[in-house]
Amino acid sequence: MMVSRRGFLAGIGGVAAAGLLPVRALASCPFRVAVINDEISQDFDHACYVAAHDFGLQWIELRGMWKKNLTNLDANELSEARAILAKYRLRVTDIASPLYKVDWPGAPISKQSERRDQFHAADEFNEQNALLEHCIDLAKTFATDRIRCFDFWRLDDARPYRAAMNEVLRKAAKRCAKSKLILLLENEMSCNTATGAEAAATLAAVTEHNFMLNWDPGNAATFPGSDPYPNGYDLLPKHRIGHCHAKSVVREPDGKWQWAPVGQGVVDWAGQLRALDRDGYRYAVSLETHWHGAGTPEASTRVCMQGLKEALAKSGSGC
C-alpha cells in the first residue's frame, strides 16, 4: 500500500516535520553519513545549513543546485558552491553525475521505458567522453575521489550490446585511474544494471580496481521478487562497493511500488548497515530521499534522515 504522509509523521510525533530532528554524534560512525544536497533544496546554502547544523553531517553528495545539474554550473557558480561548502565545513562524498545515462546507439528502446526521442541518441552518446572529462575536473574542484555513472537506459535485452557497454565502462575507469579517481556504477532500475545479481555480473566483467559499485538497495527493491538485502547484497564482491545510497520502497499487491522513508518498506536498513560494517565498508551512506510524502523535499528528507539515523543506531555499528 502507498505510504501516507499522515502515517509517517504520526509515527515520529511530527518532530521531524517541525525541523527538530535530534542531532546524533556521528564522530564514531564507521560510515561517511551524507545526504544528496538537492533532496533538501535547490538553494545550496540552505541545503548545506540543514545538512551540517540540523543533521549534524560532515559529508554531502553533490548532484544539482540552483535548478541546474552540477555538470552545468558555470565557473562563478562553482566558486560559490566551494565557498558554501567551506562555510559549513562539509566534505564531498562524490560527484553524482548523469554520466552514461543515455540511450545505447542503435539499440531498440525498451517497451517498458518512457517515451524518448532517439533522434539525438548518437550525439548524446558521443558527448559522454567530454562529460567524463568535465566530471574529472569537478572531482578535482570539490576534492573528492569518486564519480558516479550509469550503464545506459535499460534495454529489453542488453545481451547483444553488453560486451560493448562493458568496454565503455572499462575505458572510462582506466581514464579515471590516470587521475587517481574511482568510477562508481550505480545500480539503477531504469538502466542495464539494476539488481544485486546484475551488479555482480557487471563487476565481474569490468575488473578495473577503481571501478566500484554505488550500491542502492532501494533501486534494486523496485524489481518484483528482488530481495536487495540479504540476497542481492550477498552476491556482491564486498571490496568493490565504493558508495551506498539509502532509500526504500513499498510494494503494492498489483506489483507496483512507491518510494518510502528509510526504515520503512522492504529494505531492511538496520540489517544492511550491520552487514556493511561487518564487511569492512567505510565509505559513504548517502540519503537519497525520493519519497515526498511529507509534502516538500526538505520535510520529507528530514523524516528520512531520522529513519536513517534510527537504522544506524539499531545496526550496532557505533553511529
Image: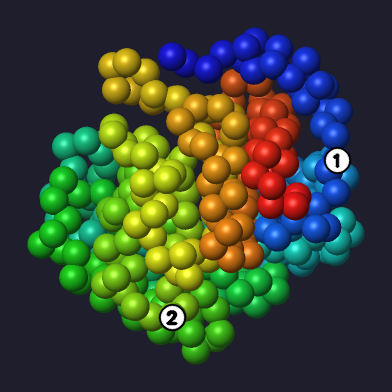
The answer, for residue 70, to whether it is visible in the render is no
Q: Position of residue 109 (x, y in %)?
A: 18, 46
Q: How is the image coloured?
A: rainbow
For image coordinates 58% across by 65% down, the residue present is: 280
Q: Position of residue 21 (x, y in %)?
A: 82, 32
Q: Choose top left, top right, bottom left or bottom right for residue 103.
A: bottom left
- Secondary structure under tag 1 reads loop
Residue type at tag 1: Val
Q: Earlier in the sequence, mark 1 or mark 2?
A: 1
Return the residue found at the far left.
Answer: 160
Q: Choose top left, top right, bottom left or bottom right for residue 101.
A: bottom left
In the image, 183 versus 38, the foreground residue is 183
Q: Residues within 10 Å of mark 1 (few under 14, many from 20)?
A: some
Q: Choose top left, top right, bottom left or bottom right for residue 91.
A: bottom right
Q: Is residue 23 left or right of residue 264?
A: right
Q: Is residue 295 left or right of residue 211?
A: right
**Numbered badge on residue 300:** none
**Numbered badge on residue 209:** 2
Q: Which residue is mark 1?
A: 23
Return the residue found at the far bottom.
Answer: 178
- Secondary structure under tag 2 reads loop
> Image height check: is 148 above or below 316?
below
> Image height check: is 303 above or below 33?
above
Q: Position of residue 71 (x, y in %)?
A: 56, 61
For image coordinates 25% across by 44% down, the residue present is: 117
Residue type at tag 2: His
Specify the quadrant that holds the N terminus: top left
For image coordinates 47% across by 16% down, the residue present is: 2
